[in-house]
């Protein structure tokens, strides 16, 4: 029996891996299958490694820990990666939002909790904010790449957070195998990846709004 994920709780970890049928490599089939789990809006994008691509997700370059859709007032609730061909490298990295700030200085944590952070959309250049990076419940929003903040104290906090994430001992590192779906709570977890070292990697990125 195929495991059915609970999109409203993903268990205590904030993420789960599911083994899906091998026949779901077409985006249309995968979308129909996911619709059985969630009545919300679903977006799919097949990502094939092309080193010269400007799009970071397709370039194979390492991606720092982040959440998706920081530039939207209402980011997707869940992010998924469905593995068609794992290739070499590109380990998925996961970190709980509250774990992400554990051990940071109190002044930095206070700034991260202020509704004073903005992000810019890479294509439209529209800006979303003000938002908190993290609140007391652990809901997190972070992507250093498109951060749009100019206050020196807040920029310094942003740089310290980025360095703090790199050193976190609580990062979960895993490798997806063919036919596996990694489903992540985008409001709770940061995710990233190590560098992809082959061009054979093919993933379908999934975003789900509920």
Image: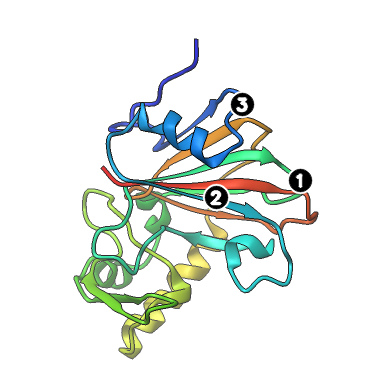
Q: Which numbered dot is residue 87?
A: 1
What is the quadrant of the C terminus in the image? top left
Q: Which numbered dot is residue 108?
A: none
Q: Give the answer, above or below, for where 117 lies relative to 93.
A: below
State which mark lies toward you, 1 or 2: 1
At a point 33% along the width and 89% down the height, the residue shown is: 150
Residue holding disc 3 = 23
Query: Which one is in front, 95 or 20?
Result: 20
Q: Give the answer, above or below, for where 149 lies relative to 130.
A: below
Q: Are marks 1 and 2 in contact (CB under 8 Å)?
A: no
In terms of image quadrants, where is residue 21?
top right
Q: Is mark 3 on a helix, strand or loop?
A: loop
Q: Give the answer, above or below, for where 155 lies relative to 37.
A: below
Label 1 crowd bin: few (<14), some (14–19), many (20+), radius 10 Å: some
Query: With 90 as the anchor, is 186 left or right in this view?
Result: left
- Report how far apart the C-alphas of labels 1 and 2 lie in the structure: 26 Å
* Residue 82 percent coordinates (x, y): 56, 39
Give the mark, 2 or 3, whose residue is nearer the N terminus: 3
Query: Which one is in front, 27 or 77?
Result: 27
* Residue 10 percent coordinates (x, y): 37, 31
Give the mark, 3 or 1, whose residue is nearer the N terminus: 3
* Residue 202 percent coordinates (x, y): 68, 47
* Residue 41 percent coordinates (x, y): 31, 45
């Amino acid at each position: 029996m195929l495991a059915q994920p609970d999109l409203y709780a993903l268990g205590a970890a904030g993420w789960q891996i599911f083994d899906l049928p091998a026949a779901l490599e077409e985006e249309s089939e995968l979308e129909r299958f996911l619709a059985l789990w969630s009545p919300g809006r679903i977006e799919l994008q097949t990502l094939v490694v092309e080193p010269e691509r400007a799009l970071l997700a397709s370039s194979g370059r390492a991606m720092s820990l982040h959440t998706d859709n920081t530039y939207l007032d209402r980011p997707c609730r869940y992010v998924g990666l469905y593995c068609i061909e794992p290739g070499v490298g590109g380990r998925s990295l996961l970190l709980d939002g509250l774990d992400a700030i554990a051990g940071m200085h109190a002044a930095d944590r206070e700034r991260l909790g202020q509704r004073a952070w903005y992000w810019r959309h890479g294509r439209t250049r529209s800006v979303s904010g003000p938002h908190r990076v993290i609140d007391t419940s652990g809901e997190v929003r972070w992507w250093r790449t498109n951060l749009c903040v100019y206050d020196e104290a807040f920029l310094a906090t942003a740089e310290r957070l980025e360095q703090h994430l790199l050193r976190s001992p609580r990062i979960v590192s895993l490798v997806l195998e063919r036919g596996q779906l990694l489903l992540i709570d985008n409001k709770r977890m940061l995710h990233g990846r190590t560098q992809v070292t082959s061009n054979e990697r093919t993933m379908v990125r999934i975003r789900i709004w509920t």
